[in-house]
Image: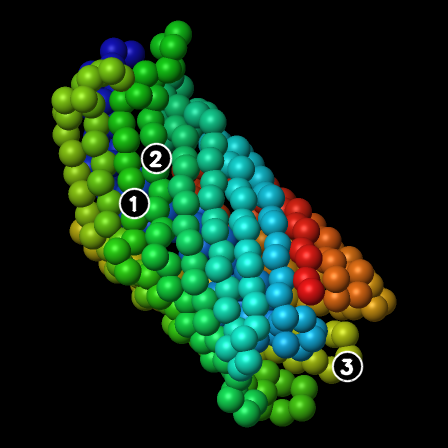
Amino acid sequence: MAIKGVVGWVLCVLVLTSPALAQLGPHAPLLAQQTLTPFGLDAPDAVEGAFFTVNPAANVALGDFGVKRIIEQDVGRLDFAAGPKVDSYVQTLAWVDGNNYWKVARYDFDSDPAAVPRVFPEDVKASFSGESWALTWARQDDDLRWGLSFLPKNETQTRLYLANGVLQRIAYGEAYSTFSVRLGAQKPITETLTLGAVYNYEHNKTNFTAVSSGLDTAAAMAVAGSYDTNVGVLGLAWRPQMGTTVAADFEHGHIEGPFVSESINIWYFSVEQFLSPNWAAKITNLDDAWGIGVNYFKGTDYNIGASYAPSGFRRTSEYLGKCDLAYLWLAKSW
């Protein structure tokens, strides 16, 4: 296929069929933005005390373990059945200062170009990359935990290549947040029940440029968009005994912008059980996709864990297929 023919086909997909894309989310650059950044990776869990949930108030859980500082490295792989294999990395530093709980987290991801046969012709390949920074502050007042997170940097890049002997870049898209914030709270309502709530707002902008040649900077067409994401999560955790937590969360919201009107309605269920003072296991169900996680604790000094979700939920599944999601992590606290 000639390069100009491919460019025209790409533009047809992104411009002429954008109402179809609205089923899953905004056009291509924003799909990566909301799948591979904190919005897509952090579990919609409003009630548990964990690093990678949507609730900033969960950071207060540091005090439950009697630690003042913790540093963690996460390494993950998102293996899309009909798309790229994406490597994901998260670095986190959290600390306690009196009744203030702070956290800085950096997310980044990258992939090699790969065919996306459900979207583009066989000789077109796509790759994704991006980086996000999240700053979190939380505190506890009596039995109320609350906090906020702000993302000063939250951006992704989507690149399309023509695989014709050598890779020639034919299109480039980017999505970035101009404002992204989360507000959250947790409060026990009985001795065994805890209620959690989160509000997440993002204002994202996108740019997509198709060029007439992989080496030509002259644009055949450029499109841009501006999108607002308003999402809330409400959750309830039940702790019938020490070491056992059963939780249910519901995530509801909207993404609005040019040619885009997406509703988000997702259930998330989890059961965590400490098998001993050192070992804990967790089973999750996110939008009918099962996952499992295992944690090993060496006192309060070290934590090693792994999680795996085969054929897990991804909002890009219509285009990239199901995604096998695996993570390993190592944390040190003192």
- Label drawn at residue 175: 1
Above or below, 169 against 77 in this view is: above
Above or below, 44 against 144 in this view is: above
Please report the residue visible at 60 percent of the width from the left and 48 percent of the height from the top: 74
Q: Residues within 10 Å of mark 1 (few under 14, many from 20)?
A: many
Please report the residue visible at 17 percent of the width from the left and 38 percent of the height from the top: 223
The percent position of residue 228, horizontal first and vertical second, equals 26, 60
What kind of residue is marked 1?
Answer: Ala
What kind of residue is marked 2?
Answer: Thr
Q: Earlier in the sequence, mark 3 or mark 2?
A: 2
Which structural element holds mark 1? Answer: strand
- Tag 2 residue: 158
Say whether residue 292 is visible.
Answer: no
The percent position of residue 310, horizontal first and vertical second, equals 63, 45
Please report the residue visible at 58 percent of the width from the left and 53 percent of the height from the top: 289
- Tag 3 residue: 241
